[in-house]
Amino acid sequence: MPSFSLKNVLKSFVEELAYTELDPKAVEEVSSTYVLKLVEEGVALEVAESIFRDLSERISGKKVGRLENKKEIVLKEFRRLLEDLFSRAGKIDIWQRTAETIQQKGYFTIVFLGPNGHGKTTTVAKLANLYKEKGYRVTIAAADTFRAGAIEQAQYWASKIGADFVSLGYDADPAAVAYEAVKRGEKGLSQVILIDTAGRMHTKKNLMDEMRKIVRVSQPDLKIFVGDALVGNDAVEQAKTFYNEVGFDGSILTKFDADTKGGAALSIVYITRKPIIFVGVGQGIRDLKEFDPKWYLEMLLD
Ligand code: GDP
C-alpha cells in the first residue's frame, strides 16, 4: 500500500497553523492557501473548503500557550473532525445484514452502481468469492448488457469461483436479467444475488432510468456505489449523480492500491454521507479489504 501524499500536505498545514494566532481570520488565511493543495491530493473542492470551515470553527479562539501545545490541539481537533465525519456516515456490517436477511426471506440481493471502468465487474467477482468462501450459494447477474466484454468477464469469474451465472445476452433488458436472478433466490436456488450493471456516462438520462428500473424490479437489500479512487473529483461528481438519481447505501472504493494521493475516501464520504464498505486493493480476486476509517485516518495523520 503506498503512503498518501495528502499526509504531507496535512502535516505542513497543521504546522503552519501552529505558528499563527488561532483567530478566524488567521486560520482562514492559512486554510485558503491549502485548499488547492488538497484538491491536488484528490479532495473535492467543496470538501476541502468545508473541512477548513469546520476546523476554523473548532479551533478559533482557543487559548493556548506553547507552540507544541498548539500543534497538539490543532491536530486533535482536525482528527476529531475527520472521525466525526466517518462516524456520522455510519457503518454497514455486510455479513450480519446478509445473514439476517437470508434468515428472514431466504436470499440477499445487492445491486452495484457506478461509472464504466471504475471496477464494478471485478468488484462483483471479488465479493462473490468472499461469499462463496463463507459457504453461501451465489448468483452473479450480468445486467451490464452494454459494455463490450462485460458479460464474458462476469461469466469468466463466475465459473472460476463456482458461482451461478445469469445472462440474457447483450441486447437484453438489464432489468429482466436482474429479475431472472432474483427468481433464483425466490425459488431457493441461490442465497446471495449480486447484480452487475452498466456505467456508460454519455447517455446519463437513459442510464439512470435503467438503474431505477433494475432497482424497482429487483428490490435490492443493498445498493452499493463502486467508485475509482484515481479519478478524483470526477468520481465525486459521478457519485453525486448516482446518489441523487438512484440512491445507494454505501460505497466501494477501487484501485486504492494505486492511489498515491489519498483524498478520494474523504471526498466520497463527505459528499454522500454514506460509509465506505470495502476498498479494492488490486486486480486479483482476493484484493478486497474491509474499509476501516481508523486505519485510513492513521495513514493520513500519524
Ligand atoms: P467496470 O467497467 O466498472 O465493470 O470495470 P472493470 O471491473 O472491468 O475494471 C476496470 C479495470 O480496473 C480492470 O482492468 C480491473 O482489473 C481494474 N481494477 C478493478 N478494481 C481494481 C483495484 O482495486 N485495483 C486495481 N489496481 N485495479 C482494479
Image (tube, helix red, strand yellow):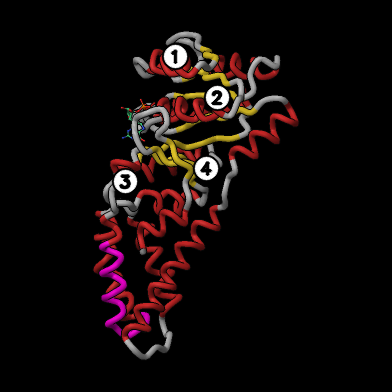
Nearest the camera: 102 or 205? 102
**Is residue 241 in sight in this rendering?**
no
Disc 1 and disc 2 in contact, CB within 8 angstroms: no
Q: Position of residue 46 (x, y in %)?
A: 37, 57
Q: Position of residue 176 (x, y in %)?
A: 56, 14
Kindly identify which residue carries mark 4: 250
The Cα atoms of the two marked residues, 1 and 4, are separated by 25 Å
Left or right placement of residue 50 versus residue 35 in this view: right
The Cα atoms of the two marked residues, 1 and 3, are separated by 30 Å
Which label is found at residue 241? none
1 or 3: mark nearer the eye: 3
Secondary element at image label 3: loop
Secondary element at image label 1: helix
Kindly identify which residue carries mark 3: 1
**Is residue 274 in sight in this rendering?**
yes
Instruction: Examine the image and state in which quarter residue 8 appears.
Output: bottom left
Secondary element at image label 2: helix
Report crowding for label 2: few under 14, some 14 to 19, many 20 or more residues within 10 A (C-alpha). Answer: some
Residue drawn at x 59%, y 39% is: 94
Nearest the camera: 81 or 148? 81
Nearest the camera: 47 or 191? 191
Left or right placement of residue 92 versus residue 266 in this view: right
Circle 2: residue type: Lys
Kindly identify which residue carries mark 2: 132
Kindly identify which residue carries mark 1: 155
- Find out whether residue 273 is within the magenta segment: no
The Cα atoms of the two marked residues, 2 and 4, are separated by 22 Å
